[in-house]
Image (cartoon, grey):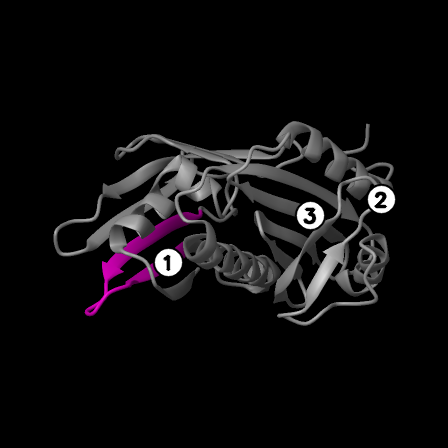
């Protein structure tokens, strides 16, 4: 079967060294993606925490820190080949300095298998990476170099994202999906309110940038829907475990785990 590739380019107003630190080190990646640990060498381990007990691991396949020419390359993939018929994803980040300043970041995810079975998964990865790279841009622009504390929670419910969003809007104290640039206050029942400006608003995600962090609510899927609440708190310390428990309880109360599903206890 023919391999499919997801390719994205970002122009960033940051030095190549700053971008390298953000995409190739555990603390840097955690500041815009998910909590992560990276051994800084080819063959080193990569460990990722997606929240709610879902973790993934892999190995570094390329480790080429930014050179004097302003170019670097970081790549990772799975430790073991997946079961037959499953895609074997690999991820590559290329950092290139621009003439006159700034950096171009080139990203490639490979390992998709051509065919209708993977179209939905491909589209989901595309939407997810575009959100995370928006996080990266915001992090570099507003919070660069600050220590991050992550709050990462996930859930699942029957139905579609179009059915789930009205539930999320009401639970956040919103009248609907606000436009980018709107000042809002998220007021969930349980977790503390969050005031800020909307910086992401599309079919899959609602994002708010507060004075101290980035806050992302997600609903993805047409036949069964994944829901998520990711928060990145920068600078001043917060009680991340307590906040994680609060947001997970909020999600689970809104969308109880369906009986009979693998997650049901």
> How many discs mark residues in the rendered view?
3
Q: Is residue 97 toward the left or the right of residue 161 in the image?
A: left
Q: Is residue 230 magenta?
A: no
Which element is circle 2 on?
A: loop
Question: What's the distance in space between the residues labelled 3 and 2, CA to CA?
Answer: 16 Å
Eye-nearest disc, 1 or 3: 3
Residue 166 picture quarter: bottom right
Q: Quadrant of the C terminus?
A: top right
Q: Quadrant of the N terminus?
A: bottom left
Could you say which is closer to the camera, residue 53 or residue 65? 65
Residue that numbered label 3 is attached to: 228
Eye-nearest disc, 1 or 2: 2
Q: Is residue 99 magenta?
A: yes
Question: What's the distance in space between the residues labelled 1 and 3, CA to CA?
Answer: 24 Å
Judge whether 160 appears above or below 257 on screen: below
Q: State the extent of the magenta-drawn residues as a range.
A: 89-109
Which element is circle 1 on?
A: strand
Residue that numbered label 2 is attached to: 189
Q: Which is nearer the N-term, disc 1 or disc 3?
A: 1
Q: Which is nearer the N-term, disc 3 or disc 2?
A: 2
Eye-nearest disc, 3 or 2: 2
Query: Residue placed at 57% from the left, 44% from the top?
Result: 232
Image coordinates of residue 246 in percent, x first then y, are 76, 35
The secondary structure making up most of the magenta span is: strand
Residue that numbered label 1 is attached to: 107
Q: Are marks 1 and 3 in contact (CB under 8 Å)?
A: no
């Amino acid at each position: 079967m023919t391999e499919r590739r997801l390719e994205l380019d970002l122009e960033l107003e940051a030095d190549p060294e700053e971008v390298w630190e953000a995409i190739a080190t555990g603390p840097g990646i955690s500041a815009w993606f998910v909590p992560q640990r990276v051994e800084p060498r080819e063959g080193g381990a990569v460990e990722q925490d997606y929240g709610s007990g879902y973790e993934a691991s892999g190995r570094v396949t390329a480790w080429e820190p930014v050179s004097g020419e302003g170019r670097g390359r970081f790549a990772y993939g799975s430790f073991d080949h997946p079961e037959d018929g499953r895609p074997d994803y690999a991820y590559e980040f290329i950092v290139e300095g621009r003439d006159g300043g700034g950096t171009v970041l080139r990203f490639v995810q490979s390992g998709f298998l051509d065919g209708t079975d993977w179209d939905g998964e491909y589209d989901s990865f595309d939407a997810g990476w575009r959100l995370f790279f928006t996080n990266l841009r915001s992090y570099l622009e507003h919070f660069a170099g600050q220590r991050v504390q992550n709050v990462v929670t996930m859930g699942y419910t029957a139905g579609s994202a179009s059915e789930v969003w009205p539930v999320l809007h009401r639970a956040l104290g919103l009248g609907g999906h606000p436009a980018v640039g709107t000042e809002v206050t998220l007021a969930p029942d349980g977790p503390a309110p969050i005031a800020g400006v909307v910086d992401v608003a599309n079919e899959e995600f609602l994002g708010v940038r507060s004075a101290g962090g980035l806050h992302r609510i997600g609903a993805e899927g047409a036949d069964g829907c994944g829901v998520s609440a990711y928060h990145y708190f920068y600078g001043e310390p917060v009680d991340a475990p307590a906040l994680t428990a609060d947001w997970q309880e909020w999600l689970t109360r809104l969308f109880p785990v369906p009986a009979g599903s693998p997650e049901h206890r």
